[in-house]
Amino acid sequence: MSGFILAIDQGTTSTRAIVFSGDGRILGVGQQEFQQHFPRSGWVEHDGEEIWNSVVTTIRFALSNAKVAASDIAGIGITNQRETTLIWDRASGAPIHHAIVWQDRRTADLCDRLKGEGAEPMVTARTGLLLDPYFAGTKIAWLLDNVEGAREKAERGELAFGTVDSFLLWRLTGGKVHATDATNAARTLLYDIGTGEWDDELLALFRVPRALLPEVMDCAADFGVTDPALFGAAIPIAGIAGDQHAATLGQACFTPGMMKATYGTGCFALLNTGTERVPSTNRLLTTIAYRLDGRTTYALEGSIFVAGSAVQWLRDGLHLIDRAEASGPMAAAADPHQDVYLVPAFTGLGAPWWDARARGAMFGLTRGTGPREIVRAALESVCFQTRDLLDAMKRDWQGGGETVLRVDGGMVASDWTMQRLADILEAPVDRPVVLETTALGAAWLAGRQTGTWPDEAGFAENWRRERRFEPAMEAAERDARIAGWHDAVRRTLTF
């Protein structure tokens, strides 16, 4: 491979910019955290301007760190936190309100009303999604109804909607390009993943004016160039994919039956189903894995809202650990005879439960329960939730063979957690050499589009496994622990 590529990885709690060499090595990194806003219980917001400033800052730092000039970059790939919703003024570029984050639950009542009116089957048939506050459509409706004058301006074409990728693209190109890719469009509740078009009936259901919407493009495409004033040269923007889709590409999951799970703030597992659009009967999502050269590849997806954020809660909320790396050794030292379960429904439960009103709960506490047992329960909760997703996927689609899970994200650095994951899944877990798979996937899209990186087959050949974790837990112990988890979940659900 040849050609420097810059990846923008705009996540839920921080922004990173990474410069990759032509052979996929990381040459320079810039990272910056930004503030989380919680104006009410269940509400989560970001400041769009702070996100934008973090992107500019981290790009400049990464270029400097890599000792690479903007003129040396063949292309930029963007990957982003999905579903997080912004609306901005087309004239000024300024957001009309804080971004409403994917975790936000403020539109639960609207989702319930639409379900009560019988709208969910039609929505699911066209979008592959469920009526849940997670997705962008109801967030757009809330902004239009709650920001003074917004709906009128939207109807006049004065405002623009976008997920974070679209907002960054607008800013990077100096307001010249209002576009997104198919994976991000597929998370809005407004996009028909079969026809590949914005759907008029869905727009009417959520009362979203078509004038707000960006153009939808392939994941690898010519998205314009950066304003030269930003970084000293105009850089082609050549790839966009939502973070979980970019991670699927970065893990080289190009073959139907391949599966990856990313353990970041939340956990998101995608199973490649190829050109087959598999409807779920187990409340998973049917989504677009990626779209290249006009051809759509589909996936089944399970979404866990709390994964790494549970470790963050142990550190910052409970002060049981002083750093995330301490969680694995603490869990390993926990009393094996205590069956403590944490159901981390801090912002509701995702797949396959989809209970927006559920809140976190802990079960099995005794006088002997201490920090170690609580830490273990937090890490195990992620493993149990992944098992629920895998079981649902197997019920929905029998097209794959033996499951081998490719993992990435911050949590996978913990050997204890990955071994427990393999034990609970009763399946091998593969950890790659390159853990920055989300950014790598975005970089590959840009490299592919600019002709400086290889195609799917060539890229897959470069994927390398660092370690495989094989299941070692006795079946009786695993079954008992899974039964205890399901009992805890049942006690937490609100329906």
Image: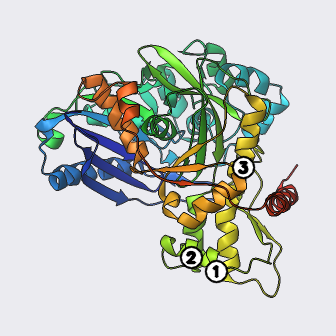
On screen, residue 76 above or below 413: above
Q: Position of residue 257 (x, y in %)?
A: 61, 30
Between marks 2 and 1, how big is the CA–CA gap?
6 Å
What element does badge 1 sit on? loop
Q: Earlier in the sequence, mark 3 or mark 2?
A: 2
Q: Position of residue 104 (x, y in %)?
A: 61, 49
On screen, residue 412 above or below 19: below
Given the image, on which type of amino acid does mark 1 rest? Ala
**Coloring scheme used:** rainbow
Given the image, on which type of amino acid does mark 3 rest? Arg
Q: In this orientation, does residue 92 appear? A: no
In the picture of the structure, the residue carrying the numbered disc 1 is 333
What element does badge 3 sit on? helix
In the picture of the structure, the residue carrying the numbered disc 3 is 387
Mark 2 vs 1: CB contact within 8 A: yes
Neighbour class for label 1 at 10 Å: few (<14), some, many (≥20)?
few
Q: In this orientation, does residue 121 appear? A: yes
For residue 114, side relative to residue 273 (left or right): right
